[in-house]
Amino acid sequence: MDCGGVFVKYVLFIFNILFVICGILLIIFGSIMLSSIGDIKDVVSTYESHSVPIAVLVLGCIIFVISFLGCCGAIRENSCCTMTYSVIMFLLFLCQLALVIIIWVKRQDILNAMNYSIKTIWDQRQSDRSLMDGLELSLKCCGYNGPTDYTGESVPKSCCGASATNCSIVEALLRPGCLKAFDRVWTKNFDIIRYAGLGVAGIELVAFIFACCLANQVRNNARRSNF
């Protein structure tokens, strides 16, 4: 194998070793999350509390398997493993690219759907305040349109932060409504989401190209050895 092939081989190997480590860390992190939850008898609570660590575990396993396949294909110069890995990376690239395009084209539709969800959470606050409290704490907002939405009601502590023991309307007036706060967060982070998605897609495309080059060189070397 020439210098270019050796370079591609070890770059691909190191790249996948890093992702193998990431996969193992995600598996460990997901396992720790699951073990720390404890016994929860309520079915809904069990589903809600276990869904995140299970998703982390599954993601860790997928990353580990794909990266391990890439490592084995690169270091053992196995064209079958390398081509399988390259096909997977190409499919991931297409999915990632499609996701970015969907987010870009459906930007306003996604925003409208999220705004509708916020309205639904607000309307259901009388029967279940937990979702509205979580929304107000995470977005540092108060009410649907603003703190004045609580006119005639007691202002919840979530309008003044997680450490607040009580909250007055005067203190809450410093915070925007949750609809405006979410729109601001979405506008601020939309480009980050888009460019991060394109960046990941670019990495997957480079991995695909490197894997194809390595697989092709391994096959050529095998043909030459038969003559």
Image: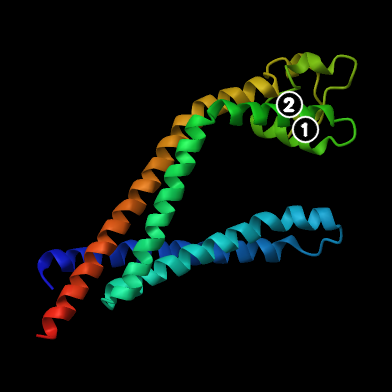
Residue sitting at x 71%, y 58%:
50
Quarter of the figure with the N terminus = bottom left
Q: What residue type is labelled 1?
A: Met
Mark 1 neighbour class, 10 Å CA radius: few under 14, some 14 to 19, many 20 or more? many
Give me the disc on residue 160.
2
Residue 200 versus residue 154: which sits nearer the camera? 200
Q: Where is residue 116 in the image (x, y as percent from the top left)?
A: 71, 28
Residue corresponding to mark 1: 132
**Which secondary structure lies at badge 2?**
helix
- Residue 29 visible somewhere in the drawing: no
Q: Which amino acid does label 2 sit on?
A: Cys
Residue 6 versus residue 209: which sits nearer the camera? 209
Q: Position of residue 88 (x, y in %)?
A: 41, 61
Q: Kindly indicate the quadrant of the structure image that contains residue 39.
A: bottom right
**Residue 150 as seen in the image, left or right of residue 110:** right
Q: Kindly indicate the quadrant of the structure image that contains residue 153.
A: top right
| Above or below 85: residue 119 | above
Spatial CA distance of label 1 from label 2 is 13 Å
Give me the disc on residue 155.
none
| Above or below 72: residue 57 | above
Tell me which numbered mark, 1 or 2, is placed earlier along the sequence: 1
